[in-house]
Image (cartoon, helix red, strand yellow):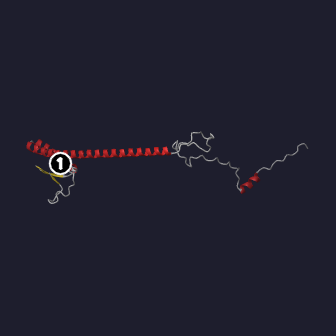
Amino acid sequence: MRSSKPRSRKNNNRNRQPNQGGGNIPNRVFDSSGPEGKVRGTPQQIIDKYQQLARDAQLSGDRVATENFSQHAEHYLRMLGAAQKEIDERREVQERENRERQAERDRERAERDAERAEREAAQAAQAPVVADAPVGSGDQPGLIEAAPAFESGLVETPESKPRPPRKPRGPRKAPEGKQAAAVDAAPAPVQATDVSE
């Protein structure tokens, strides 16, 4: 089993990153020197190829070649299984760290909320208390009972204020040219005449 990347003898450990033992094995391309020659591909592709070669050898009746191909396939299966196990362990560690970080964030948020609630309670305790007497009772003129702020949660905006009623319009005036024509076309007032004559 040789990696497809050529390495020089001097720099064989310089480019390796720590804690990446089997990190990329499932996607890495290998050159496998088997009994029938080189097989190249990812571990899963090599496993499939050796299993196919073992089936072909079994059909031809060659028990030695069948066992040889099966052992090669088994080697890559173990390697792939170990890499997958390492990836799963790393994922579990990362998920555990993420859960711990999230729990720490939640704890900090709860502490901030508690501190904010204490500050608001302290400010409410320092606020002046309004008189118990009803408005206009005469005991203390000018003292108004405070209403709780934002009872409904709505804020009055210019659009939500009621509009003042409009003034009624007077009679419309016709334009001057049409007004003169309207006077000419109007029937003359009838005068009362005495019919007794």
**Residue at the (33%, 44%) spot, across then down:** 103
Which of the two residues, 196 or 101, is positioned nearer the viewer here?
A: 101
**Residue 175 point in image, percent of width and height:** 70, 55
Residue topped by disc 1:
46
**Residue 186 point in image, percent of width and height:** 76, 50
Q: Does residue 66 lie above or below 10 as drawn?
A: above
**Residue 170 point in image, percent of width and height:** 70, 50
Left or right placement of residue 31 versus residue 157 in this view: left
**Residue at the (41%, 45%) spot, across then down:** 115
Farthest residue to the front: give it.
139
**Residue 51 point in image, percent of width and height:** 15, 44
Crowding at mark 1 (Cα within 10 Å: few <14, some 14-19, many 20+): many
Which secondary structure, mark 1? Answer: helix
Farthest residue to the right: give it.
197
- The type of residue carrying mark 1 is Ile
Left or right placement of residue 34 versus residue 186 in this view: left
**Residue at the (12%, 44%) spot, across then down:** 71
Which of the two residues, 94 or 172, is positioned nearer the viewer here?
A: 94
**Residue at the (76%, 52%) spot, across then down:** 185
Quarter of the rendering containing residue 8:
bottom left
